[in-house]
Amino acid sequence: MKATTAWLLAAAVATGYAPRAQAGVPSFEAVRAAHAPSDRLLLDRHGRPLQVVRIDASVRRGDWLALDEISPALRDAIVLSEDRRFWDHGGVDWRALAASAWANAWNTRTRGASTVTMQLAGLVDDALVRPAGGRSFGTKLSQALRAREIEARWRKTQILEAYLNLVPLRGELVGAAAAAQQLFGKHASGLDRSEAALLAVLVRAPNAPAAQVQQRACEVLRQQALPCDGLALVLGQALERRPGPAAGEQLAPHYARQLPRPAPGQPWRITLDAQVQRAAAQALRQQLAELRGRNVEDGAVVVLDNASGDVLAWVGSAGSATSGAPAVDAVLARRQPGSTLKPFVYGLALQQRLLTAASVLSDSPLQLASGGALYQPQNYDLGFKGAVSVRTALAASLNVPAVRVAQMLGPEAIFQTLQRAGLKPSESAGFHGHALALGSAETSLRDLTAAYRALATGAMFGPAVDYIVADMLADRAARAITFGLDSPLVTRGWAAVKTGTSKDMRDNWCIGFTQHYTVGVWVGNAGGAPMHGVSGTEGAAPVWRALVQVLHAGAPSQAPAPPAGLVAHGGEWFLPGSEPAAGEAARAGSTPWRTANFGIQAPRDGAVVVLDPDIPMAAQRMVFRGAAGRWTLNGRPVGSGEQVVWLPLPGRHLLERSGEAGRVDRLHFEVRAAPHVQEARRQNVH
């Protein structure tokens, strides 16, 4: 039967008989253009290689190789093994076809009559793909006729080039480029005679046992008068090689997962900067090595361009060398951000004009009702600083003053602000309650870094408020009571920065921005295990500073110019209308907000007193203290002696103390409160 089929095929081809209508043969150029590698090279914003990305999981194909990019040894071995008269026939090898028919008639094993061109026809035409049960007579005839058409339109060199790029080899490997890389770890141009012989015999039996592959490859070498020495070793190493990514540096595996796949033939360029990406990964690995022994395994880094919002670096994991979960993209993982949310709390209070940067807050023990229990916020050092300015409270990351401000605003307002910042806070405002200001709602490093960029560009609360918040975050002196004058938060140029640590030290953050960049760093454990005594300045901040130094290696970051409308007064910045009145300052004969009046010890000149909505008004009385004398408030007597107690009334006030020899001491202060507190005060008064 086989002999009959072979003779019929030969007769049909010779007479030009065709069993079906033949579509036009694609051109060589069209076939080459349609070739889609399974791995694509990802380029950075400057065209530098970043990552090789697998985009087709079904096969492994390399880039299309020109014939002169493929080892001559492989070209010779393929022709010798598959089609000895390739350079002479016109698509069908009549001698081989006749020999195959005669041998099949006598049940003699021989090489098949399918030429390289006939095999190529089956590779470029889906209708001619070999089915599991073998080709029918009609399909074989169509394949032979299509091979003759290809030979009529293509050059021989084009046929061999296309075949070497499209032929299936072992397992998922297709084409010489992928096979050479995966089996021998080299470019196809570097294949030697032994390697070429092994690949050539895999064409006919891609998944044959190793012994059979070795035997057939040795036959190919002997036909070239070459020895088979070492062939077993080369084959053994090839088959033991574990499948992996194509050669090249793998800089951005996590970021590459999210990207849309490019069109075939189009360059794949993204916003990442290879130099910044490499520096971020190196700084993170180095810091995690420093923290070895303190139960810290993982970290992540994001760098954004302030002007465009482009992602310049995205390190989702420190890599398999140190990470407990290298496949997890920690940039996207949601965790508690700790104190890194405080700038948004203070920014909202500034925007609502409940506070100024010079307002005085109480950093003292606080107990608040929370779900039938008492909520008692503590500072990181478990101590208290007493009366502090808003500037100091934010820059030094004091917890109790932040909670007091949050009580003025209410959890719902804060929750809505965090949503507006793009942080996508977890649960609800009521769920978090008082702890919301201290970062109990989960968010991701990606979203948190983007929110800080909004502060950097004036897009969060508006240019004026965002500038004041940034100015406080950049104040080294104001943060000194907690961090000291020299810490990883200090850079040689201007930078606004905030650290954060979540409950039980499970997450460690450092987010900040410079003149041109916003950098976010997270350090912790992907599995959520707590670190051993690692604070924000010890964990994430060193990575942050290292990157800022790289980003501004050429020129230090410059402080931004204050936006139009801001008022500079007594060394502090104010929104228009929130600063002390110039006339009152002149009458007082002192510089408001900064200079003490020694006849009056308390309150301080220019102080802003903020009423707490959760403390009864009767318990928030102010004490005027100083030298003995007569005390008047806004021209009305309020008492005499060294101390006078007063029930605060929201508004601006002029306090005067009249002493001996007609001396009068004066100062101005302000009382502020949320609207519902003001209503309670009015009810108390009446």
Image (cartoon, rainbow, N blue to C red):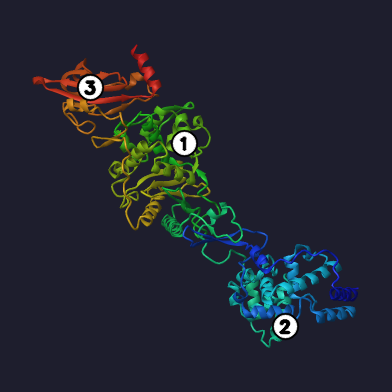
Find the distance from the CA under tag 3 to the CA under tag 1: 37 Å
Q: Which residue is mark 1?
A: 418
Name the residue rendered at 62%, 63% in the picture.
37
Horizontal and vertical percent for residue 668? 23, 25
Image-quadrant location for residue 19? bottom right
Up the image or down, 445 lies above or below 609; here it is below
Q: Is residue 325 visible?
A: no
Q: Which residue is mark 2?
A: 219
Please tell me how crowded label 3 is: few (under 14), some (14-19), or many (20+) other residues with Cα within 10 Å. Answer: some
Name the residue rendered at 30%, 18% in the picture.
647
Residue extending furthest toward the top: 686
Up the image or down, 108 lies above or below 448; here it is below
Name the secondary structure under disc 1: helix
Name the secondary structure under disc 3: strand
Please tell me how crowded label 1 is: few (under 14), some (14-19), or many (20+) other residues with Cα within 10 Å. Answer: many
Relative to 594, 264 lies left or right: right
Q: Is residue 504 visible?
A: yes
- Amino acid type at mark 2: Glu
Q: Which residue is mark 3?
A: 654
Image-quadrant location for residue 344? top left
- Amino acid type at mark 3: Leu
Task: Work out whether mark 3 precedes mark 2 in sequence or the reverse, and give the earlier one.
Answer: 2
Q: 495 or 432, which is in the foreground?
A: 495
Task: Work out whether mark 2 precedes mark 1 in sequence or the reverse, and give the earlier one.
Answer: 2
Q: Tally the numbered discs.
A: 3
